[in-house]
């Protein structure tokens, strides 16, 4: 099963490499990875999506917790949560397809953020499944380039991941 | 307020931290630190002949004393040479602080002379690591390093120190930090009371219980409590290789150690148990054999200070995260005054165990006949007799390691010092050195083989310099015995590179360093040679004992089998 693990990490040099290294060292999967500073300059928030059965996920969270640079973590998939990813896509937009792309962009509530005579650059946010669906819809037209941020997430309701 | 250079801060900190010995080797990036150590006399620096030996010596010291071992090496090759010793300490959870010189900060990343990203290289084999970015950080970072290395589940910590951080011209305020806090590190101090109660209920109701305890009891200084608990309950106990001596092996309730080359009765008892009480052990593959066939009828209680050890390879029914000593003492107070529910079942269980013991009695190995080569097993038994089972015994890795663990009887913890997790050949001799310097009045013997000994024999020179009187028992079968055993069993005895051609004349070699060597070929020579070797506690003596190269280590678990699937000799199996 797919899990989204959010981590508060010491904003220290080498901290990220410890997290990433742990996954390869212990033969765990990383599907997506996303990291940026938080409102507290001493902390980064890192979100990783990974796939594994309960036993593997238990090991992943235990080993992550063991890293000295990991201050706190939560498996968002254990409760209700909001999951978002941002994607920028360059797609071909020539002839009849130009209108078709525009229509599809509207259906997905995406935005065209850059235009040239031959292509559109589309910005789209949503959960990973929505982004996948958009890519599928665009495939016949011709996808030129994809840049995805990886999943970021937060728990619904009063639950807060903080110190 | 005191102003000190980075280098002087390091020397002062080590003094304030109570460090007696530091093992190391100088080089460019560490020279300021070496100069600071030279100008003081509280911390004694031991100059090894290879950085790997520094880490093993510090490791041996740490295991025997329970205090963190300290290593100082220079950048680049100095640091990379230390890697095997750091990995050895990591796998066996040994507290160690490794100070590495590094090139000047402005050169980092430029492939400067003797530059290695040692924090990167050691990342998967350390508990944590630090890079010093300003000299004023030194006292706090070092305190954190010692704190992390020696608390919770202990382990090695690397501190990378660029040369400009120790420059003698720059001085900063020095205060010894008595305490440090890390917001993300709070090792547990006691187990969950509810879980401990649950565990004790299962223990009292058990019909076929076995204690299975590991290195965590030794490093957690919980041997006394464990012995008390096991005695109170009257249960059998087996330990891992790392846990040997946590419970006296000469006691009736001890079944010896378990696993791949563990005792027949240990492995049989584990397989048939209805309750396994695991404390400070990690269900390692050399213990469990095939996990899907592991202890099919047993419920499992697992106590460990490291939550990631629990249910890693074998699912625990009652997990308890906590240090061995406090959990055990809580268990003792709960057991007190509560008799076990099924004393008759326990009696039957002991009858069964005694039956297994009797099956193998006198059949463990075939002693040599007059005129035949000595067996390693009888040599270790003689060693145990002569040293009254009281020596610190270090080993290298291979057949001799297993023989030492099987035939020397340990009644105290921290007496068998061996590389259990990583299995590092070359560990034993430098480790013995580190122990002997700190326990000068005890017998310290390295049981080794001619293969392993040659990996670290340059340390004879260190022993000469500091007058380190360890004994070296070389079980010389002129082959890499364990490799050869596997080749006999799995490769139709094709001995690919497992023989030792062109061995040195050990007699001449040892004498070249000014030490005594004794060659032993026969049973008549053995005991007198051992007596002679242990006559003077302060003299290094090397015993070159020629042993049977055809001997195998048994019992040996059958690959992919259960605990009870064992080869018992070249012709018998369960």
Image: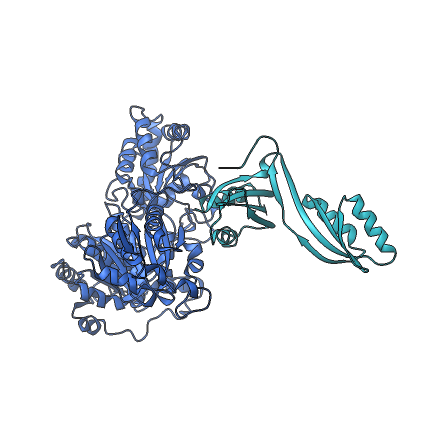
Chain colours: A cyan, B blue
Q: Is residue B525 above or below residue B343?
A: below
Residue nearest the observer in this picture, A82 or B424: A82
Displayed quadrant of residue B271: top left
Location of residue B482 with respect to B262 vertically, above or below: below
Residue B319 screen position, x and y as percent:
43, 36
**Residue B542 in sight from this viewpoint:** no
Nearer the observer, B217 or B244: B217
How many marks overall? 0
Q: Residue furthest bottom?
A: B502
Relative to B540, A85 lies left or right: right
Q: Residue at x 52, y 54 (%)?
A: A24
| Residue found at x 84% / y 54% | A98
Q: Is residue B389 left or right of residue B81?
A: left
Residue B333: tell me if it is visible.
Answer: yes
Q: Residue furthest right?
A: A96
Depicted B518 relative to depicted B435: above or below: below
Residue A127 occupies which quadrant of the picture? top right
Where residue B113 appears, as percent x and y from the top left, is 40, 70
Spot the residue most to the top.
B337
**Residue at point 68% right, 46% down?**
A128
Front-lying residue, A132 or A161: A161
Residue B299 spot, x, y in % from top left: 44, 35
Q: Nearer the viewer, residue A101 or B7?
A: B7
Q: Quadrant of residue B207?
A: top left
The x and y percentages for residue B269 are: 37, 41
């Amino acid at each position: 099963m797919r899990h989204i693990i959010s981590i508060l990490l010491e904003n220290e040099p080498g901290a990220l490499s410890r997290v990433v290294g742990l996954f390869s060292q212990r033969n765990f999967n990383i599907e997506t990875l996303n990291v940026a500073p938080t409102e507290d300059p001493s902390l980064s928030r890192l979100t990783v999506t990974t796939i594994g059965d309960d036993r593997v996920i238990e090991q992943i969270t235990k080993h992550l917790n063991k890293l000295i640079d990991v201050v706190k973590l939560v498996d968002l998939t254990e409760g209700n949560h909001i999951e978002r990813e941002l994607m920028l896509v360059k797609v071909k937009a020539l002839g009849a397809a130009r209108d078709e792309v525009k229509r599809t962009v509207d259906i997905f509530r995406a935005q065209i953020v850059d235009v040239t005579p031959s292509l559109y650059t589309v910005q789209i946010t949503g959960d990973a499944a929505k982004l996948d669906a958009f890519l599928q819809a665009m495939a016949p037209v011709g996808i030129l380039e994809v840049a995805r941020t990886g999943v970021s997430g937060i728990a619904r309701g009063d639950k807060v991941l903080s110190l | 307020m005191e102003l000190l250079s980075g280098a002087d801060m390091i020397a002062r900190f080590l003094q304030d931290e109570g460090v007696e010995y530091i093992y190391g080797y100088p080089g460019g990036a560490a020279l300021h630190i070496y100069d600071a150590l030279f100008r003081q006399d509280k911390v004694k620096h031991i100059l090894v002949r290879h950085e790997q030996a520094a880490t093993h010596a510090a490791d041996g010291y740490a295991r025997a004393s329970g205090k963190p071992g300290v290593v100082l090496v220079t950048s680049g090759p100095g640091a990379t040479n230390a890697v095997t010793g750091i990995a050895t300490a990591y796998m066996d959870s040994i507290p160690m602080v490794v100070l590495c010189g590094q090139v000047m900060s402005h050169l980092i990343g430029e492939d400067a002379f003797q530059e290695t990203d040692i924090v990167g290289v050691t990342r998967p084999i350390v508990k944590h690591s630090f890079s010093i970015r300003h000299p004023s950080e030194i006292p706090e970072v070092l305190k954190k390093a010692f704190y992390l290395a020696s608390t919770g589940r202990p382990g090695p910590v690397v501190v990378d120190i660029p040369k400009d951080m120790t420059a003698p011209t720059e001085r900063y305020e020095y205060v010894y930090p008595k305490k440090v806090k890390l917001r993300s590190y709070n090792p547990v101090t006691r187990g969950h009371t509810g879980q401990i109660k649950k565990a004790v209920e299962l223990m009292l109701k058990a019909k076929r219980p076995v204690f299975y305890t590991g290195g965590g009891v030794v490093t957690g200084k919980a041997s006394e409590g464990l012995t008390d608990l096991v005695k109170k309950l009257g249960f059998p106990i087996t330990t891992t290789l790392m846990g040997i001596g946590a419970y006296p092996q000469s006691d009736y309730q001890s079944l010896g150690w378990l696993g791949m080359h563990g005792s027949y009765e240990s492995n049989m008892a584990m397989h048939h148990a209805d309750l396994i009480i695991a404390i400070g052990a990690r269900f390692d593959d050399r213990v469990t054999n095939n996990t899907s066939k592991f202890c099919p009828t047993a419920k499992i209680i697992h106590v460990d200070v490291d939550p990631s050890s629990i249910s890693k390879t074998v699912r625990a029914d009652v997990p308890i995260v906590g240090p061995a000593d406090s959990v055990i003492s809580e268990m003792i107070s709960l057991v007190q005054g509560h008799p076990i529910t099924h004393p008759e079942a326990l009696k039957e269980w002991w009858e069964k165990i005694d039956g297994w013991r009797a099956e193998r009695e006198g059949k463990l190995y075939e002693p040599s006949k007059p005129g035949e080569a000595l067996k390693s097993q009888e040599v270790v038994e003689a060693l145990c007799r002569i040293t009254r089972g009281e020596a610190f015994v270090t080993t290298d890795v291979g057949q001799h390691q297993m023989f030492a663990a099987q035939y020397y009887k340990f009644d105290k913890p921290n007496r068998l010092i061996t590389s259990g997790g990583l299995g590092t050949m070359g560990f034993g001799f430098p480790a013995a050195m580190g122990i002997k310097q700190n326990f000068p009045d005890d017998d310290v013997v390295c049981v080794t083989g001619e293969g392993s000994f040659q990996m670290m024999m340059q340390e004879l020179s260190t022993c000469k310099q500091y007058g380190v009187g360890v004994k070296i028992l070389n079980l010389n079968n002129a082959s890499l015995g364990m490799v050869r055993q596997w080749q006999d069993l799995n490769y139709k005895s094709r001995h690919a590179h497992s023989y030792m051609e062109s061995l040195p004349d050990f007699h001449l070699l040892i004498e070249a360093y000014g030490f005594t060597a004794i060659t032993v070929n026969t049973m008549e020579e053995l005991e007198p040679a051992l007596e002679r070797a242990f006559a003077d506690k302060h003299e290094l003596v090397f015993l070159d004992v020629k042993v049977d190269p055809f001997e195998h280590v048994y019992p040996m678990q059958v690959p992919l089998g259960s605990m009870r699937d064992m080869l018992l000799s070249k012709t018998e199996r369960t």
